[in-house]
Image (cartoon, grey):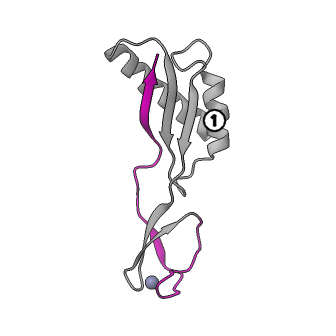
Amino acid sequence: MHELSLAGGILGIVEAAAQRESFARVRQLHLCVPALAGVEVEALRFALQAVAPGTVIEGAELVIDEPAARARCAACGGMTAVREQARPCPHCGAYRLQVLPDGGLRVVDLLVA
Ligand SMILES: [Zn+2]
């Protein structure tokens, strides 16, 4: 499962931060998962809960933002926000929207205990 390896990656980031900033407990983990980044948010929540026990994120509240992706129309050059693939351009109606890479999943913030 793809989300399980993502969860492991997030845990690695948080544990590195815990070591660097010497905290032992995360109260809230704030993530950003842009639409169309290929991540199932529910599966990611589940995976994080699966890897959490015994780690710094055990018991942490999970806050996940799911902003729309940005796309540029290859026909008219207009910019728009998209949440689904295969939508027409709102400016010219062409089915030529190209989703711009947005960095994908990232850790936004950590509240530590
Ligand atoms: Zn267009």
User: What percent of the width, then of the height, locates residue 56?
Assistant: 51, 16
In the displayed structure, 109 sits above or below 65; it is above
In the displayed structure, 63 sits above or below 79; it is above
The residue under the point 67% across, 33% down is: 46
Quadrant location, the N terminus = top right
User: What percent of the width, then of the height, locates residue 28?
Assistant: 51, 27
The residue under the point 58% across, 75% down is: 87
Q: Nearer the viewer, residue 27 or 22?
A: 27
39 with respect to 31 (left or right):
right
Query: Hey, which quadrant is residue 106 in on the image?
Result: top left
- Name the amino acid type tagged 1: Arg
User: What percent of the width, then of the height, locates residue 48?
Assistant: 60, 29
Q: Is residue 110 magenta?
A: yes
The reply to whether the residue tagged 1 has its Cβ within 8 angstroms of ligand 1 is no
Most extreme residue toward the bottom, as rendered? Answer: 92
The residue under the point 40% across, 58% down is: 101
Label 1: element kind: helix
Q: Is residue 46 magenta?
A: no
User: What percent of the width, then of the height, locates residue 68?
Assistant: 51, 59
The boundaries of the magenta stretch are 84-113
101 with respect to 55 (left or right):
left
Crowding at label 1, few (<14), some or many (≥20) Cα neighbours within 10 Å?
Answer: some
Q: Nearer the viewer, residue 82 or 74?
A: 82
If the picture is divided into quarters, which one holds ligand 1? bottom left
The residue under the point 60% across, 38% down is: 3
Residue annotated with mark 1 = 45
In the displayed structure, 84 sits above or below 52; it is below
Q: Total of numbered circles in the picture?
A: 1
Dominant SS type (magenta)? loop
In the displayed structure, 1 sits above or below 52; it is below
